[in-house]
Image (cartoon, helix red, strand yellow):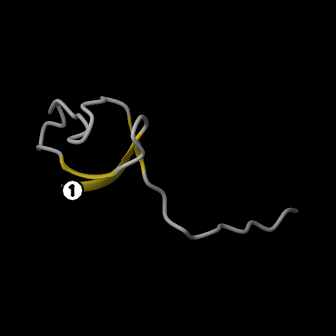
Amino acid sequence: MAGSYKCARCKQKVEIDIDSEGRKQIRCPYCGHRILFKERGAGIKELKAQ
């Protein structure tokens, strides 16, 4: 399963394949930082208040 993430330190976009167990050491390939943020879609949700 591939996921699109953004590094917290260098702000580079990173594509990471996570193994089936989800226990892989995940690091930014550019700076080696371990904190990555999942990128969100551009869609905006609108909810009707009652």
Instruction: Name the secondary structure under disc 1.
Output: strand
Place of residue 25 in the rendered image (x, y in percent of width and height, measured from the top left): 17, 30
Vertical relation: 23 (above or below) 19: above
Q: In this view, does 42 lie to the left or right of 20?
A: right
Place of residue 14 in the rendered image (x, y in percent of width and height, measured from the top left): 28, 51
The N terminus lies in which quarter of the figure?
Answer: bottom left
> Quadrant of residue 34 in the image?
top left
Q: Nearer the viewer, residue 47 or 35?
A: 35
Count of numbered labels shown in the rendering: 1
Residue occupying the point 49% across, 64% down: 41
Residue receiving disc 1: 2
Q: Nearer the viewer, residue 30 or 36?
A: 30
Q: In this view, does 46 lie to the left or right of 17?
A: right
Q: Which residue ends up furthest to the right in the rendered image? A: 50
Q: In this view, does 50 lie to the left or right of 6?
A: right
Vertical relation: 2 (above or below) 10: below
> Quadrant of residue 49 in the image?
bottom right
Residue occupying the point 43% across, 37% down: 8
Residue occupying the point 41% across, 34% down: 9
Q: Which of 38 and 34 is in front in this view?
A: 34
Vertical relation: 38 (above or below) 22: below
Vertical relation: 47 (above or below) 25: below
> Quadrant of residue 13 in the image?
bottom left
Amino acid under label 1? Ala
Q: Nearer the viewer, residue 2 or 30?
A: 30
The C terminus lies in which quarter of the figure?
Answer: bottom right
Place of residue 23 in the rendered image (x, y in percent of width and height, measured from the top left): 16, 30
Residue occupying the point 17% across, 45% down: 18
Q: Dot 1: few (<14), some (14–19), or many (≥20) neighbours within 10 Å?
A: few
Q: Is residue 40 left or right of residue 19?
A: right
